[in-house]
Image (cartoon, rainbow, N blue to C red):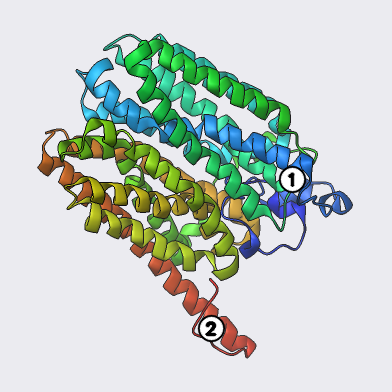
């Protein structure tokens, strides 16, 4: 499992290509009217600290936010397995997977709107309200009864998903208040919090569930989230004043005009196909491994391994993309994720291949999440970037909503063949997403070559796109 609404206004004249991969999730600068209404404040905005104890304290708080929100979503594979066997044994895999899918749908679907609200009002309302929703939803989940499916959907899918969206976007957006040249590095640290949560929470739950039962295991998870989010609310203080916006400006967070551009169409298709299957291994790797001979004691660590490998993949690709070009990074990493599923996950029958798959899939797949905003920024006009990203995230939200439940439908028979079909499906979808990104790369490369020829520059084998 890729953001700050203030980045473009921090230092005027920054080019789109200089944005870090996770700096524009909110995309609140999407319309020109919004920018025109903002009062001029160059002397303040140009003085970006780019470090200092206050800035790094904000980064630590933002990282804790993702730890307690997206990190719990990254741990859903544990819930998927436990619900299927214990809490919701009468429900199909698809229905159980829909709980996690709705969380992802809310996270990405609401991100552009939350970004606009952050622009207008800052984090002072969003962070406390979102934190309350997260902790309250976890405590309500701990009271959910066996086979009462609606209780799990209301608490874990709907309320937790909305709360996570309310804190996720501000956590990424506020970093732009404090960093410019070190922005990619800072945002990578923030994003790594989600992967770290995906390591810690599965281990905690799998240790506690057999000893304490469902209720208290979930409550302990809630207390951990409460501590992290309290720290976040205290430390995440904005440096810049909110930009006033009318209700109409806030609601204009999606722009469909980009679909006249072939590169943008391919970028959207790439995001849709990739996210359709990107999280399938996170949900089903444990069941696949146990069915193919791995002991449950070892299989329970595959999800933490994927998330642990995702920590560097949130940081390093963004830094490299600033140097070599975002498409040059995204295309091989996305294609690699799909091919890895087909070449390594699909034929895996022993412990070593499955562990290797978990490591390398975590390393490769996390990069798409973090690089997607920069991918869209590379092919979008700067004033329209936020709204263009909002349209892409609308498709991403739908893909997340239907992707993992589709995987549950494929595995419904519970046989080895069914899970191999799942691996083949996931690998094919992500590979198609990578091919769409490759198509966008070819179009952008052609544009870059034409532009260099018009300017009389020399053509080189390497193009930074």
Q: Residue at x 54, y 22 (%)?
A: 224
- In the shown orientation, is residue 354 left or right of residue 200? left
Image quadrant in which the N terminus is located: top left
Q: Quadrant of residue 79?
A: top left
In the picture, the disc for residue 177 is 1
What residue would you read off at disc 2? 450
Res 19 seen here: yes
Question: How many numbered callouts?
Answer: 2
Task: Establish if 322 lies above or below 243.
Answer: below
On the picture, is 92 further left or further right than 260? left
The Cα atoms of the two marked residues, 1 and 2, are separated by: 36 Å
- Does residue 119 appear in the picture of this structure? no
Question: Residue 200 at what x, y percent from top left?
Answer: 46, 32
Q: Residue at x 34, y 56 (%)?
A: 337
On screen, residue 254 above or below 259: above
Secondary structure, mark 2, is helix
Q: Position of residue 255 (x, y in %)?
A: 54, 50
Which one is in front, 431 or 49? 49
In terms of secondary structure, where does tag 1 sit? helix
Q: Is residue 407 left or right of residue 202?
A: left
Residue 202 placement (x, y as % from top left): 39, 30
Q: Is residue 296 above or below residue 182?
A: above
Camera-side residue: 240 or 311? 311
Between label 1 and label 2, give the one nearer the viewer: 1
């Amino acid at each position: 499992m890729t953001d700050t609404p203030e980045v473009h206004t921090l230092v005027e004249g920054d080019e789109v290509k200089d944005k870090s991969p996770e700096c524009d999730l909110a995309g609140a600068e999407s319309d020109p009217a919004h920018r025109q209404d903002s009062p001029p404040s160059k002397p303040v905005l140009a003085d970006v600290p780019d470090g200092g104890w206050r800035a790094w304290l904000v980064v630590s708080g933002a990282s804790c936010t993702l730890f307690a929100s997206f990190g719990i979503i990254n741990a859903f594979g544990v819930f998927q397995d436990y619900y299927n066997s214990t809490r919701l044994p009468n429900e199909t895999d698809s229905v159980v997977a829909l709980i996690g899918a709705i969380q992802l749908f809310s996270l990405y679907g609401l991100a552009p709107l939350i970004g606009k609200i952050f622009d207008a009002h800052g984090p002072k309302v969003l962070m406390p309200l979102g934190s309350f929703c997260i902790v309250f939803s976890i405590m309500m989940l701990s009271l959910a009864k066996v086979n009462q499916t609606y209780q799990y959907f209301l608490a874990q899918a709907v309320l937790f998903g909305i709360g996570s969206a309310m804190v996720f976007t501000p956590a990424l957006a506020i970093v732009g208040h404090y960093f410019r040249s070190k922005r990619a590095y800072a945002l990578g640290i923030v994003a790594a919090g989600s992967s770290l949560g995906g390591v810690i929470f599965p281990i905690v739950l799998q240790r506690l569930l057999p000893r304490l039962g469902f209720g208290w295991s979930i409550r302990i998870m809630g207390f951990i989230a409460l501590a992290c989010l309290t720290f976040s609310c205290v430390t995440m203080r904005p440096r810049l004043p909110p930009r006033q916006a009318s209700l109409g400006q806030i609601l204009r967070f999606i722009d469909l005009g980009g679909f006249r551009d072939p590169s943008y169409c391919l970028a959207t298709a790439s995001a849709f196909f990739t996210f359709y299957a990107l999280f399938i291994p996170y949900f089903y790797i444990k069941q696949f491994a146990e069915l193919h001979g791995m002991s449950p004691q070892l299989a329970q660590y595959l999800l933490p391994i994927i998330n642990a490998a995702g920590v560097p993949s949130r940081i390093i690709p963004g830094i490299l993309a600033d140097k070599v070009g975002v498409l040059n990074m995204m295309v091989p990493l996305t294609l690699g994720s799909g091919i890895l599923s087909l070449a390594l996950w699909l034929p895996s029958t022993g412990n070593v291949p499955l562990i290797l798959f978990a490591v390398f899939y975590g390393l490769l797949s996390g990069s798409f999440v973090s690089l997607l905003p920069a991918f869209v920024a590379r092919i979008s006009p700067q004033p329209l970037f936020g709204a263009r990203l909002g349209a892409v995230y609308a498709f991403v939200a739908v893909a997340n909503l239907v992707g993992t439940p589709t995987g549950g439908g494929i595995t419904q028979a519970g046989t080895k063949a069914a899970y191999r079909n799942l691996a083949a499906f996931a690998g094919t979808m992500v590979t198609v997403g990578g091919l769409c990104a490759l198509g966008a790369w070819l179009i952008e490369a052609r544009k870059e070559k034409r532009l260099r020829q018009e300017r009389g520059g020399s053509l080189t084998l390497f193009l930074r796109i």
